[in-house]
Image: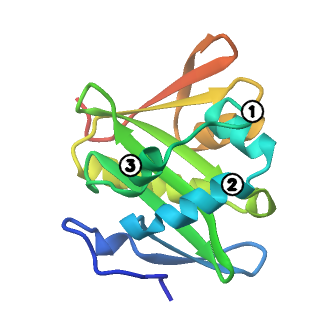
Amino acid sequence: MLHRTTAHPPGYPEHLERTQSLPNGETITVRPILPSDAAHIRTALQTADSDTLYRRFFTSRPKISDDTIAYLAEVDYRRRLALVAFASDGPIALARYEAETDPLEAEIAFVVSPDWRGLGIAQFLGQMLLDEAEANGMHRMIAYYLSTNDGAAGLLTRLGFVPDENEHGVTTAHRSLTGAE
């Protein structure tokens, strides 16, 4: 079951609907985000522990408006893409990329529920995003993470990112995509 709750919006990439077996024996489903997922985002932000929020937003209690939640759930599937991973009891991870001011560069970001970390979910989602970003014409990806976040550093290294800047405790890492000039 791919947790489809509404009709697909224009441009919805059905080819990104997947199931994935995990090392713990669980199977997850992954699909592109839908506007109806705004409720999942709101609930996840309201129930997330402060460490998860701090690692993702660099603050333990981000103030995120309803407009921002709607923005996060509504993507064009080309310049802005988000993937949601579901376990049997609901969403467990979200990964996204979004083009920056340079239309050929996109920022990539991840969040995985604490109970589901260390199972390769972020790496699986990240590789899907990198492949799709390249197919959508992106040439370069960028990621920002807290310099103390060893999990993010390791994940991004495994995905081929190279850290190149550390400012005020935030590391910037870049990765060229295969077809990039």
Q: Position of residue 148 (x, y in %)?
A: 77, 26
Q: Position of residue 143 (x, y in %)?
A: 51, 32
Q: Position of residue 157 (x, y in %)?
A: 61, 36
Whether tag 2 and tag 1 are in contact, CB under 8 A, the answer is no
Disc 3 from disc 1: Cα separation: 26 Å
Q: Quadrant of residue 169?
A: top right
Quickly name the residue at label 1.
149
- Indicate which disc residue 23 carries: none
Measured along the vertical axis of the image, is residue 134 above or below residue 181?
Answer: below
Q: Is residue 136 left or right of residue 66?
A: left
Q: Amino acid at mark 2?
A: Gln
Q: Quadrant of residue 32?
A: bottom left
Disc 2 from disc 1: Cα separation: 22 Å
N-term mark: 3 or 1: 3
Measured along the vertical axis of the image, is residue 180 above or below residue 42?
Answer: above
Quickly name the residue at label 3.
71
Q: Position of residue 107 (x, y in %)?
A: 43, 35
User: Can you name the residue that lies furthest to the front here?
Assistant: 66
Q: Quadrant of residue 5?
A: bottom left
Are there few (<14), some (14-19), or many (20+) residues within 10 Å of tag 2? few
